[in-house]
Image (cartoon, rainbow, N blue to C red):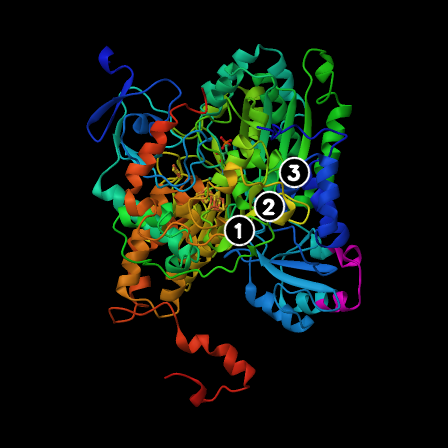
Amino acid sequence: MNVKKPEAPSSNRPHLLACLHQLQHQFRHIPVNQIAPLAQTLELPIAQVQSVIDFYSFFTRTPRGHYHLLFSNCTSCGDLQLMRELCALLKVQQGITRTDGLVSIDETACIGMCDQGPALLVNDQVITHLSSERLHAIAHLIEAHTPVDDWPSDYFVIQSNIRRTGLLLQTPLAQGAGLTAALAQESEALIHTIKQSGLRGRGGAGFTTGLKWEFCRQAQGTAHYVVCNADEGEPGTFKDRILLSDHAHELFEGMTVAGYAIGAHQGYLYLRGEYRYLVPHLESILAERHEQHLLGQTILGQGDFHFEIEIIVGAGAYICGEESALLESLEQKRGVPRVRPPFPVTHGYLEQPTVVNNVETLVAAAHIAAQGAAWFKAQGTEKSAGSKLLSISGDCKTAGIYEYPFGVTLQHVLDDCGAIDAEAVQVGGPSGTLVSKADFARTLAFEDLATGGSIMIYGAHQDLLKVVRNFTHFFAHESCGFCTPCRVGTPLLRKYLDKIAAGHGTAYDREEMARLAKLVKKRSHCGLGQTAANPILDLLQHFPEVCEKRLMLKDYEPFFDLDAALETTRQLSHRNDAEAHLA
Amino acid sequence: MNPALANTLTIDGQVIPFTQGQTIMDAALAAGIYIPHLCHKPGLTPHGSCKLCTVDIEGRNVSACTYPASAGMQVANNTPALNEVRKTLIQMLFVEGNHLCPTCDKTGDCTLQALGYHLGMLDGHFPPFYPLREVDASHPDFILDRDRCIMCALCVRASQEVDGKNVFALSGRGANNHVIVNSPSGKLGDSDLTQDDLAAHICPVGAILPKNQGHEVPIGRRTFDLHTVAESDLAVALMKTEHHDD
Ligand SMILES: Cc1cc2nc3c(=O)[nH]c(=O)nc-3n(C[C@H](O)[C@H](O)[C@H](O)COP(=O)(O)O)c2cc1C
Ligand code: SF4
Ligand code: SF4
Ligand code: FES
């Protein structure tokens, strides 16, 4: 075949995603006439560039406004009512750039500001604590063409909200301490320590980190790679954001330690596009580490271990958090999960042995290298050693970051954050588990309630059908579309749930939805599809009455709603009287 | 393990041999066992996307076309439950696109349709999506009707791996997936697709069709009028037994 194997983008050939971000910034869209030249510069097929543009939400084919505002639609950091309010103030339609080109407004998936929402992105900046007053001020600033840089700086304040510290957050790691300890031993011994510590991946799946490193070290390849997964796309999760902003040294230290352990000289930090505002900060830490000889050619003055870290910024695709999709994205392709086996530890980035680890995993690894396995293992449970950072949001008094030893009960956590009227908690984000009050005594640990760190709390006043609908829409929007069960199944689940929520669903629809949900869960290609139906299945199991009371008492009701279909005609004829409606 | 079973696996109780590097699908087809498939063609790199070849190994879901065969594997394939899953998947593919078989020149030669019959599908069952995807009639010899595309990527792989070109690619995300053409204008007429390309003839549905010829073979004498999908897919497999890894 004449299709080139993917090559590493080198310094003289920038990364496709970086080029597209640049074009999107410059022209507020990706102009058609820029595509062929870009493909030529990067020596990529035109179709590959096209397909990447059309995969990632942050790249558009038509110009966005000079001010482009994306409101989070997350149940914790989103408020679409506010979005509609701003649309009205600025006379724009959602998703359609105003005719003068000044402004465009749309919604986007969770932007990781759940402890300080409602929030939005304006161009690349985050604004938190939205309120009606703030929106009025924003509307004025936009109409006055005030550059975003000149907007009141307090709009852009992002708090860390660390509420409870534990192993990782309590004791700051002296810069270089982990690396010094690591380089003092053979890499095998280091891997042994990581294995001994019982550290398991914090990104969700919980694979034993030491084992992963060992498999990777043993795998044959022309080069080995370390990839840090900072895609943090699971709605309700923001703990990696805090680690990136407040503990970046420890993260880069962990990546470098991993590099030493597996014999890699190159690391990549794959950062979600929503966190682009962190890039200057992260770059400055990288520069600092070079100066301190904690990165680069002569790490800690030793000539035989060199390591570099590059930051690649994603562009609005939750699926790129799935490790093999992330690697595809790093290879300048659409983020479509790979067929497994083989696994990244043997065939990862550029088909070479690659360790992909979550931000928190790598921070923990840096600490363990410095403080030893016993220090870590002293906390947690038998199967879940150490501590876990939780991002807590929703109906509670003090949302924010809480670090607990594994094994803590959900009830304990709820008490600490002041969730007094919690009826349901979504543990682990939409892809996790919807837990009802009856199960609040369950523990947070890999052996019971596993979580990547998202805890979303819903009080008694919340409509859980609305919550589950939000999640179901999220998955349909984020499905990569590779496999049939998820590509077709997630939009179908959305249709069923919308129908039921609108009061048009029958018991038959509910049964068909459940049957489809089970198929999507069991037969999908990757973790996204395999978890996309969890919210629906959990709702039906633990809160059956929520669906039941919306059902119609008939055997069959078509999806096609004739009255709704006449809406366009009513608008065109300026009629909305009783005669213009069916029944 | 019993040494006699060292290089065998079991499909629905039938013990069959395999060689290292073969997938479950490879081994099954070589043994004359039909596992329904849509995005797979022996000789091309397996894709693993349609999930028609879904089988169970001790209750665990696996795609036969991509999963390596291993000794002693117990595979459930032709079971009522799995065929029900496959029927549902076919229904999902039908409602996702615009498949108006009586008006499609591929009728009778279409693997999607044939699998519908094979699995006893009587209706689309789910609410249709009615997509509006672009039709490309710019090529002198072929037409690309994206509304019938099932995203199997057979054309993509055939072009890359057999024709030595790179005419097609899949683009978009989720339900917006669609096939695109690798040419400056994005039009098929601008690409280097030619009559003798496998990519021009491999489409299992009526998304890539030859132009200038309509209903050359009368309905009633078409592929699946004469053979079941199982018969014809097994026949093809047996003709081309070499594996892409060999
Ligand atoms: C749809 C999907 C999204 C994911 N998103 C993330 C993510 O944002 N961050 C992350 O670390 N892992 C994510 N994962 C898990 C990764 O695939 C992978 O297991 C993890 O990065 C491994 O690192 P760890 O072992 O340190 O946890 C996701 C998985 C799936 C299926
Ligand atoms: S399960 Fe969904 S996200 Fe995963 S490969 Fe299939 S379509 Fe893509
Ligand atoms: S055009 Fe045909 S061969 Fe190509 S992906 Fe679509 S259905 Fe498959
Ligand atoms: S034939 Fe195996 S997934 Fe399509």
Considering the whole magenta stretch, tell me its main secondary structure.
helix
Q: Residue at x 33, y 58 (%)?
A: B124
The magenta segment is: A139-153
- What kind of residue is marked 3? Pro
Q: Is residue A152 magenta?
A: yes
Quadrant (top left/top right/bottom left/bottom right) for the N terminus of chain A: top right
Chain of the residue on which disc 1 is drawn: B
Which of the numbered marks, if any, corresponds to residue B191?
Answer: none
- Disc 3: which residue: A45
Q: Is residue A530 left or right of residue A111?
A: left
10 Å neighbourhood of mark 2: few (<14), some, or many (≥20)? many
- What kind of residue is marked 2? Val
Numbered disc 1: secondary structure: strand
- Disc 2: which residue: B181
Mark 2–mark 3 CB contact (< 8 Å): no
The CA span between labels 2 and 3 is: 10 Å
Is B145 drawn above or below residue A79 in the view shown?
Answer: above
Is B125 drawn above or below residue A190 in the view shown?
Answer: below
Q: Is residue A295 magenta?
A: no
Pick whichever, A581 or A215, lies toward us.
A581
Which of the numbered marks, if any, corresponds to residue B144?
Answer: 1
- What kind of residue is marked 1? Leu
10 Å neighbourhood of mark 3: few (<14), some, or many (≥20)? many
Pick whichever, A543 or A175, lies toward us.
A543
Where residue A410 sits: x, y (%)? 39, 45
Numbered disc 2: secondary structure: strand
Pick whichever, A3 or A320, lies toward us.
A3
Q: Is mark 1 within 8 Å of ligand 3?
A: yes
Q: Are marks 1 and 2 on the same chain?
A: yes
Mark 1–mark 2 CB contact (< 8 Å): yes
Query: Which is closer to the viewer, label 1 or label 2?
Result: 1
Chain of the residue on which disc 3 is drawn: A
